[in-house]
Amino acid sequence: MVKMDETQPPALKKFILWKDEGEAWLSCHPPGKPSLYGSLTSQGIGLDGIPEVTASEGFIVNEINKKSIHISCPKENTSSKFLAPYTTFSRIHTKSITCLDISSGGGLGVSSSSDGSMKIWQASNGELRRGLEGHVFDVNCCRFFPSGLVVLSGGMDAQLKIWSAEDASCVVTFKGHKGGILDTAIVDRGRNVVSGSRDGTARLWDCGRSACLGVIADCGSSINGVAVGAADNSINLGSPEQTPSEREVGTEAKMLLLAREDKKLQCLGLQSRQPVFLFIGSDAFNCCTFLSRFLLLAGTQDGNIYQLDVRSPTVPIQVIHRSGAPVLSLLSFRDGFIASQGDGSCFIIQQDLDYVIELTEADCDPVYKVATWEKQIYTCCRDGLVRRYQLSDL
């Protein structure tokens, strides 16, 4: 494991902000140094309807508008922009929302809840469109196919299901896993999909014939997250031992990434089923995503975000550690990424910005999943709310 020290980029140091009657408290946590504490005080509302805020010694308010405030800590050469939700949807589910996704056209959302329900809703206003009923027990994961007209879900009932977003019918059910399905990935346009399960296997499925095309990996440990990505030409994915089925579509030159409960991050060739690398982290891996054809991110239960290069994966490019809270979701976004954690923090890091964007208001409730459409970011949380943020509000 790589320790955090002053080689960590300044933008990754952490701010915490919480409100209290016109006053907010600030803290900045530079790696390997004592934390700096301060406060913000509102002097009242200006004529433009925006609060006039001053910061205590050591902090500066750079900019403020109705939806965001940009604060810097000059001593540590770091700054964060805190963004409030543009709108909040409270009527979709009554309990904790465990997963969500937004359709490719941005018109629809789908989400699953710990109350056992899965629903499709209007992304603009949160208005319910239809319920997707058929899983027994909790639905762990749900996502749209690239068409935006079809939904893929996986549940604790060990079933993978495909649904019509238009009439809520379940068109396909895949059976074969022996434990709950924890994550899924769609290959190309969606003729094949991948699932990861508590039974320790990752499986490839043929959607047209609702059949399993093979067990891609059997690792003896729960697979918490899966990701599929196109591989750079320089990466040796190996060759299949057997001729792939003609029902496999789009698996060639693809990598499969598995975030495992046994502290291992596994990468293999999706078509070849051959190992590419096995990386051991500091704790259970919860989630993973590809940033490019050779860069990836993976998050652990003890709050580490590992950035690895598939071409030389033995030593991480960097390890980002903002708190000890579990990293629950990672999403590639523009030239950076969005991460959410179990302490309610959700943040955006971009290469071209010298500040971190913090998505606020989840307080201390875990933010389980993040989805985006253009400049809009949606989050789902244990408090039962879907929050929509507008990056144009910055």
Image: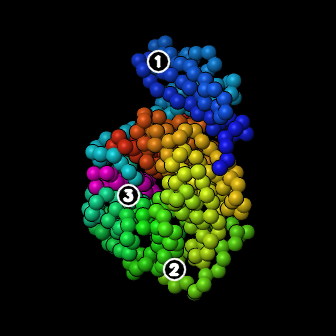
Question: Visible in this render: residue 319?
Answer: yes
The reply to whether residue 390 is in sight is no
Does 31 sit above or below residue 157? above
Few, some or many residues within 10 Å of mark 2 (<14, 14–19, 20+): some
Q: Tell me the distance, in whole angstroms, between the alpha carbons under discs 3 and 1.
A: 39 Å
Q: Secondary structure at mark 1?
A: strand
In contact (CB < 8 Å): disc 3 and disc 1: no
Marker disc for residue 140: 3
Residue 364 located left or right of residue 315: left
Look at mark 1 in the image and give the residue it sits on. 23
Q: What span is colored magenta in the figure?
A: 100-121
Give the mark, 3 or 1, whose residue is nearer the N terminus: 1
| Alpha carbon separation for disc pair 1 and 2 | 58 Å
Is 353 within the magenta?
Answer: no
Quarter assignment of residue 90:
top left
- Rate crowding at label 1 as few (under 14), some (14 to 19) or many (20 or more) other CA atoms within 10 Å: some
Task: Give the mark nearer the N terminus: 2 vs 3.
Answer: 3
Picture quadrant of residue 103: bottom left
Q: Residue at x 58, y 60 (%)?
A: 265
Q: Position of residue 101 (x, y in %)?
A: 42, 54
User: Which residue: 58% across, 64% down?
Assistant: 266
**Rendered location of residue 331, percent (x, y):** 53, 52
Between the residue at mark 2 and the residue at mark 3, the CA separation in whole angstroms equals 26 Å
How is the protein colored in the picture? rainbow
Residue picked out by circle 2? 248
**Residue closer to the observer: 34 or 22:** 34
Front label number (3 vs 1):
3
